[in-house]
Image: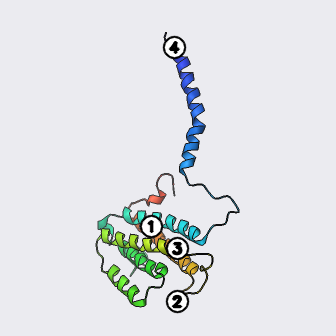
């Protein structure tokens, strides 16, 4: 017995409609649950979430620039850009600064050694690896921030203050990198797919 195509179409439509809530529920369960309003969040969770978001945008932007454009700076364009950092130098600067902001109690000698090593890097792969290494240290640092130690003074400042300054510093340079990408006809990854 052959079932008319109109009935088959209706049956498929009914199955799709019936399955939609289950599919939506499965999709929602893949996302981490958003904490309820009024839920207390630990400092390490708060800073960690902010750092992860900034890390994704920053690393993706750094990886989006072709290696032959890592030396690009807008110095040859109209406006006063004399002495500005190249794209690669922006990334190295943030990798270096991350050790200051998120290095904990690193000695001045260790910070200088880290800075000197980063300054010597030339290839895109080396620079991005240095950035990723500094971000791994940043995650270690913020995971140690507690309600008890967040605003206790250390040699360089409070842990919460240093983490906040480190995040703001990355955002500042991310904005500059976005301009450099766009000047080279590259849409920043965070702006693709219906973004800005």
- Judging depth in this view, the residue of 42 and 138 nearest the camera is 42
Question: Mark 1 = which residue?
Answer: 58
> Which mark is first along the chain, 1 or 2?
1
Q: Is residue 33 visible?
A: yes
Which SS class for mark 2?
loop
> Which mark is first along the chain, 1 or 3?
1
Q: CA distance from mark 3 to mark 1?
A: 18 Å
Q: CA distance from mark 2 to mark 1?
A: 28 Å
Residue at image point 34% right, 79% down: 118
Residue at image point 50% right, 71% down: 171
- Judging depth in this view, the residue of 148 and 185 nearest the camera is 148
Quarter of the view holding residue 114:
bottom left
Which SS class for mark 1?
helix
Tell me the tag on residue 155: 2
Which of discs 3 and 1 lies nearer the camera? The answer is: 3
Q: State the image coordinates of residue 28 (x, y, percent, origin top left).
A: 57, 47
Q: CA distance from mark 4 to mark 2?
A: 79 Å
- Which residue is the extreme one toward the right? 38
Q: CA distance from mark 4 to mark 1?
A: 57 Å
Question: Mark 3 = which residue?
Answer: 142
Q: Is residue 155 above or below residue 82?
A: below
């Amino acid at each position: 017995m052959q079932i008319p195509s109109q009935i088959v179409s209706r049956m498929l439509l009914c199955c799709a409609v019936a399955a939609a809530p289950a599919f939506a529920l499965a999709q929602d369960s893949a996302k981490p649950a958003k904490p309820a309003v009024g839920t207390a969040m630990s400092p390490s969770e708060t800073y960690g979430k902010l750092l992860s978001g900034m890390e994704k945008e920053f690393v993706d932007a750094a990886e989006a620039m072709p290696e032959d454009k890592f030396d690009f700076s807008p110095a040859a364009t109209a406006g006063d850009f004399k002495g500005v950092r190249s794209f690669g130098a922006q990334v190295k600067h943030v990798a270096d600064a991350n050790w200051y902001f998120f290095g904990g109690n690193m000695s001045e000698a260790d910070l200088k050694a880290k800075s000197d090593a980063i300054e010597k890097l030339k290839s895109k792969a080396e620079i991005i690896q240095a950035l990723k290494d500094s971000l791994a240290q940043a995650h270690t640092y913020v995971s140690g921030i507690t309600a008890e130690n967040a605003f206790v003074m250390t040699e360089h400042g409070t842990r919460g203050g240093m983490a906040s300054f480190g995040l703001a510093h990355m955002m500042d340079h991310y904005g500059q990198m976005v301009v450099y990408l766009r000047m080279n006809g590259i849409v920043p990854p965070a702006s693709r797919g219906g973004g800005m």
